[in-house]
Image: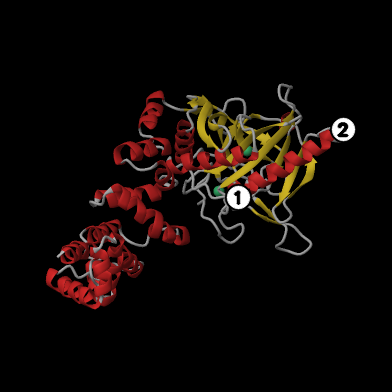
Amino acid sequence: MTWETIIGLEVHVQLATRSKMFCGCPTTYGEAPNTVVCPVCLGLPGALPVANAEAVRLGVRGAQALGCTVHPVSVFARKNYFYPDLPKGYQISQFDRPLATDGAIEVETPERGTIRVGITRLHLEEDAGKSLHDRIPGHTAIDLNRAGTPLAEIVGFHDLRSPAEARAYLTTLRQLLVYAGVSECSMERGSLRVDANLSVRRPGEPLGTKTEVKNMNSFANVERALEAERARQVALLEAGGVVEQVTLTFNAGTGEVKVLRAKEDAHDYRYFPDPDLPPLVLDEAWLAAEQRGLPELPAARRARFIEAMELPAYDTGVLTAEPAIADYFEAIVAAGTDPKTAANWVMGEGLASFNETGRFAVAPARIAELAALVAAGTVSLQAARKIHAELVGRDASPIDVAERLGLVQVQEVGALEAWVDAVIAAHPDEVARFRGGEGKLIGFFVGQVMKRSQGTADPKAIQPILKSRLAG
Ligand code: ZN
Ligand code: MN
């Protein structure tokens, strides 16, 4: 008998603001410890928080991109707990009146096709500081630079049925938030963090006890961690044991999950409305204007690429993975290149440099010029790739580079005829066989002409000349 896996994810993303959630401290990354702090984010007595309007706007934008209902009135609440890196003794969050609820996103999954995953809620909160366990031997150091960083917590409904679906959901969610400009969503830099809840049950039975897995630093590791936790729960149940409600941590080195602590219940946090902050009231007309101003989202862009540009679905998926890739592709098309050719350049040479450096090395207009040279037969595709390599990191005209490197193909009829005649004269046997019906020898003759021209002849221009000479 099989087990059904039930997964729900909570994702924290850092909102892409320049300053913190309730003070003016910058959100710059990688500063010396405890240097970007002030009385507000240090929780000093008497300091008063003021909500960051840009953080609110980005939270609204994220909620709208996820199809949520944004509430005109929401409330900031104190989530009370004691931890060394939480200077106030509470985190400002939202509890019973969150910014937004009841959204859903469509996710392409490996096993079940397109599924709908509910978004239970999106609320605003501030981040805590950081405990550093490896900085001072035998001690824990506290860095409060992160304290007060604006976050959106996105709670997904437990609609996911496998670790692979969890990964697909995260990929889709990240793509949406990056497109909407809400967050950088980098797990490496800590601007996207995932807590995963998993339980198993026999199909048709009530939900089993869920556990929470933390400490995963990539989407691939979320999938691995959930596979390990599923295996652990199934083994436990099949041996007649019970699943305890615990929090586990994933060790990417061993691929194992380890119990960290028994899970606290929500009421332990003694939530109450923050008396220092008024309710967050949003104007309905402003919300409607924000909804209209939402940038084109990935699904719409994919549909447009397939319909208006007649691109294959595979290409479309690659090109829309990130807005920067799609923008680059569209700029090449706008410069006059046909979409499929532009797609090939982006997916080949373009992505090679983008994946390495995070940016495209050659200007879209230069790619368009290069593609035009290939289309006109001025250079071969192979030569164009060499020219592209020369254009990386420096702006130059592709035709100038082609001339400098001797990559311009000879298309002049007189020169081509001379090479063709020389090849025909040198291979009387093959000529006789060709004339006797061995049509496939045409490739041999083209190869010989290319060899004689030292690779400079335009192979497309050779064919008609060869054919007419060989016919005679
Ligand atoms: Zn501050
Ligand atoms: Mn949270």
- Neighbour class for label 2 at 10 Å: few (<14), some, many (≥20)? few
Q: Is residue 377 left or right of residue 118?
A: left
Amino acid carrying label 1: it is Ser
Look at the picture and state if 283 lies above or below 79. above
Extreme residue toward the left, this view? 414
Closer-to-camera residue (455/331):
455
**What residue does disc 2 label?**
240
How far separated are the C-alphas under marks 1 and 2? 33 Å
Q: Position of residue 201 (x, y in %)?
A: 74, 28
Look at the picture and state if 294 lies above or below 445. above
Q: How is the image coloured?
A: secondary structure
Q: In this view of the protein, can residue 40 be seen by the observer? A: no
Q: Position of residue 29 (x, y in %)?
A: 53, 56
Closer-to-camera residue (285/104):
104
Residue 126 is marked as none
Residues at badges 1 and 2 in contact (C-beta under 8 Å)? no
Q: Position of residue 208 (x, y in %)?
A: 75, 28
**What residue does disc 1 label?**
218
Q: Residue at x 32, y 40 (%)?
A: 310
> SS of the residue at dot 1?
loop
